Structures are given as structure tokens and as C-alpha cells.
Amino acid sequence: MIRLLLLAGTSEATHAARQLTEDGADVISSLAGITTSPVQRVGRVRSGGFGGVDGLSRYLTDHCIDALIDATHPFATVMPFNAAIAAKEVGVPHCRLLRAPWTASTGDLWVHVSNAQAAAMQLAALGAERVFLAVGRQTASHFSDCRNLSFLVRAIEPIDQALPGAHVLLQRGPFQLEQERQLLIDHKIDTIVAKNSGGVATGAKLIAARELGVRVVMIARPPQPNSEVAASVDDAVRWFRSLGTPSSPAS
Ligand code: NAP
């Protein structure tokens, strides 16, 4: 049985844990430990950082890990690099489960920015007034210096830093189109700030924005390591199958 460490933090990681377990893997899902009520998942679960590259390398060795799938979020900036380096260091096959980014379609009013700070600066320049911050709890704090804006913030957990005039919605996706359309209408949103996470779970807000002529400030993804990429859970399962079974120690 292949023992697989799955770095979690996305809905794909939850689905992958189930599919890979059904496929015969001994899956250990790893959570960063920052969400107080993580979703239930199939297989074993561990929680908390490893202690950088060295800690992860040690974990891979000490726990006899045969393969590593990094299914952390596309906006995770540290873990994907740590995973790539540690896996190479200890010789464990590794792939990055990374969904494709969203791309603009006809009718979209997207303004592309490179990071959250740039998004915060754009809001005044664009004349935004009522802003839906769909960027998650950690990134919302980058907007605390914005003045004279009414913010609607959606996050899974309460946000760390109060934003002036913020209305906070504590919700976990997936979100449906009708729900997103109504949200934009009810809160008279003129601008959405979104991270280009990709995927269907949080993509409906972009369709609603297109329909209603709401502008989207789209934050580009951070750099990724040069790893083998699986673009979907099915691709990750195919990658896993391609590994075969671990060789038994010579007797
Ligand atoms: P990050 O910057 O890449 O990671 C920061 C540190 O958190 C890492 O160095 C590692 O600590 C620990 N860590 C991250 N993911 C881990 C995992 N799956 N298992 C064990 N330790 C982990 O990531 P982040 O942006 O802070 O995000 C933290 C978690 O939230 C990730 O799992 C990510 O998938 C999820 N998430 C992030 C976003 C986002 O927008 N950034 C959105 C949704 C979900 P050590 O160095 O000590 O090992």
C-alpha cells in the first residue's frame, strides 16, 4: 500500500483524500491548523506546520511516506516551495494539485492586479464605493487603510482586523449563482475584489458580476514552483496510479 502525504487546504484535497483512499492509498491529510472547524475527510489527518523544509523532509522520512501531493491553495506562497524542495531532498515522488485559473470572458469588467496591496490601491482610483471583498480572512486585512468605502467581507472564520464599515458574512463555499446574484444586488455592490483561485466552488460570483455589470479587481496568483502539476483530482489520481506499488525491501 502506498503511503501518501496530502497537503490539504482546498476542496480538491478533501475529494482527493476520498478518491485516493478508494484507490488503495494510505492517505495522511495535512492541515495547516488555522481553521477551527475543518471539514471531515476520509483517512488519517494531522494538523500544524512541519517546521519549514527541514521539518517536512524529516516527516517524509520518519513516516515512511512514498508519495506527496501538494493540494494547498493556489495562493499559498510558502508550502508549495517547501514541498517541492523537501520531496526532491528525500527522493519522494511529488506533484502539485493546482486547478486552472479563471479567465475573463466577453462582458467581464476585470481589472488585473498583481497582489492585494495593488488591489487596495486600485479601489480609490476606480471610484469604488461598495466593495465585496471575496479574498478570505488573511487577505482582508490588507484593505484596512482604505477609507470611505463600504466593505462586504466573506470569510470562513471571523476576520482578524476590523475594516471600516465592513459587513462580515461568515460562510463556507460552494456558492450558487442565484445566491451570488442576490448578494450583489442586496448589498448594491459595484466592485468585487477576488483572488484568481479558479474552480467552480467560488466561481459563481464572477458570472453574477458579468450579468450585473459589476467590476472585478482580480488578484493574480503568486509564483509557483516548477513542479509536476495535476490540474484536477482525476489527474492526481492518474499520477498516483502511475507510481505503481512501492518496492519491497530486499530480503
Ligand atoms: P503558506 O503561506 O504556503 O504556508 C504558511 C505555513 O503554514 C507553511 O510554511 C507551513 O508551516 C504551514 N502550512 C501551510 N499549509 C499546510 C498544510 N497543508 N499542512 C501543514 N502545514 C501547512 O499558506 P497560507 O497561505 O498561510 O495558507 C495556509 C493554509 O490555508 C494552506 O493549507 C492553504 O492551502 C489554505 N488556504 C490558503 C488560502 C490563501 O488564500 N492563502 C486560501 C484558502 C485556503 P511550516 O513551514 O511550519 O511547515
Image (cartoon, helix red, strand yellow):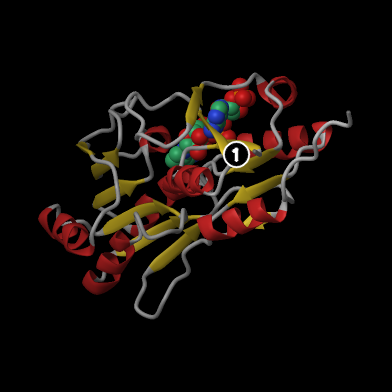
In the image, 47 versus 226, the foreground residue is: 47
In the image, 51 versus 251, the foreground residue is: 251
Image point (40%, 36%), residue name: 41
Q: Vertically, is 171 above or below 106?
A: above
Q: Vertically, is 164 above or below 209?
A: above
* Label 1: which secondary element: loop
Position of residue 250 measured from the top left corner of the image (x, y, whole percent): 89, 32
Q: Amino acid at mark 1?
A: Thr
Mark 1 and ligand 1: say if the CB distance to the nearest ligand atom is below 8 Å: yes
Position of residue 172 measured from the top left corner of the image (x, y, whole percent): 28, 42
Q: Vertically, is 24 above or below 46?
A: below
In the image, 86 versus 41, the foreground residue is: 41
In the picture, residue 146 is in which quadrant? top left
Image point (51%, 43%), residue name: 21
Q: Which residue is mark 1?
A: 77
Image point (39%, 53%), residue name: 194
User: Is the C terminus in the top left, top right, bottom left or bottom right quadrant?
Assistant: top right
Circle 1 packing at 10 Å, graded few (<14), some (14-19), many (20+), is some
Q: Seen from this angle, which residue lies furthest bottom?
A: 106
User: Is the N terminus in the top left, top right, bottom left or bottom right quadrant?
Assistant: top right
